[in-house]
Amino acid sequence: MSTYIIADLHLSEDEPAITAGFMHFIHQQAIHADSLYILGDFFNYWIGDDDQTELHQQVSGALKMLTDKGIPCYFIHGNRDFLIGKRYAKQCGMTILVQETLLELYGKRVLILHGDTLCIDDIAYQNYRKKVHTPWIQCLFLSLPLFIRRRIAQKMRKNSQYASSMKTESIMDVNPQAVVNALTHYQADWMIHGHTHRPAIHEVLINNKLCYRGVLGAWHHEGSAFVINEQGIELIFFPF
Ligand code: LP5
Ligand code: MN
């Protein structure tokens, strides 16, 4: 039995192959898991739990099937789906966790997070993040009609793609000191995150203790997950 961790699927109607890959993953792999953790950017964007599209219902149905079978599912918000709320979580049967959560898994202390909060050199993004995490701004956005919210989200995605194309790779990566601070704060052995779309396992030496930072891959042409069990922690990739 294993715990699975995934992130950055960016599910959308425009990418049916990723949705099919996710359904396959649920029925072939997650169904045999101890538990499933989704570390954000599960959807390409989220504009409110009242946006009940066919895709959102198909995905919630798949997760509900898992949770009904006794496989708990947990979710941490990403920068694209931070508006996923209690209603959709309930529909999926999943539990929303705080943005930094420490797990004790098979004898290891594993800190899980989306990863955007580690990218502190991306000052434009961090300023933007503060704004969109302001409760009254979120309330205002959620009070708008769905078609307007969708237009705003699509515009924000375009702006983000342009803004990211103008930034250097290093600005958009995690800040090494932020990684050390988080691992130290939680006295964690491992940190697992997504967001940067640079799948890897990095060694981090802190006061002579060897820790690890695992980075999940985005689901573009293949799936990516961390599999954790008594044998250890492994980063896997699988075709859709
Ligand atoms: O997502 P990704 O990986 O491509 O890029 C991120 C950062 N971009 C974002 C923006 C999202 O992609 C947009 C998703 C839409 C959300 C749904 C609607 C919710 C609306 C809620 C309103 C309350 O997160 C990108 C990073 C990159 O990761 C790497 O880390 O660089 O950051 C940006 O592109 C941000 C720009 O640099 C700064 C934009 C300034 C805009 C200022 C207007 C803010 C006012 C908002 C008030 C509504
Ligand atoms: Mn992200």
Image: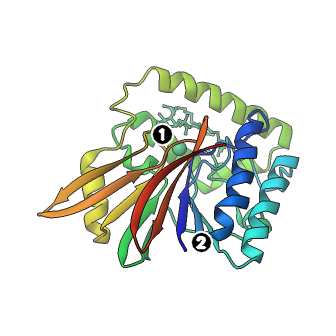
**Residue at (88%, 48%) from the top-left corner?**
54
Question: Which residue is the site of mark 2?
Answer: 35
Q: Are marks 2 and 1 in contact (CB under 8 Å)?
A: no
- Spot occupied by residue 151 in the image (x, y as percentages of width and height): 77, 32
**What distance separates the C-alpha of mark 2 from that of mark 1?**
23 Å
Q: In the rendering, which numbered label is found on residue 197?
A: 1
Number of on-image labels: 2
**Residue at (58%, 74%) from the top-left corner?**
34
Residue 233 or residue 188, whichever sits in front: 233
Instruction: Give the answer, above or below, for where 172 lies relative to 186.
Output: above
- Spot occupied by residue 29 in the image (x, y as percentages of width and height): 64, 61
Determine which quarter of the picture holds residue 16: top right
Residue type highlighted by circle 2: Ser
Residue type highlighted by circle 1: His
**Which element carries disc 1, helix, strand or loop?**
loop
**Is ligand 1 less than 8 Å from the beta carbon at label 1?**
yes
Q: Which quarter of the rendering shows the N terminus? A: bottom right
- Spot occupied by residue 127 in the image (x, y as percentages of width and height): 45, 40
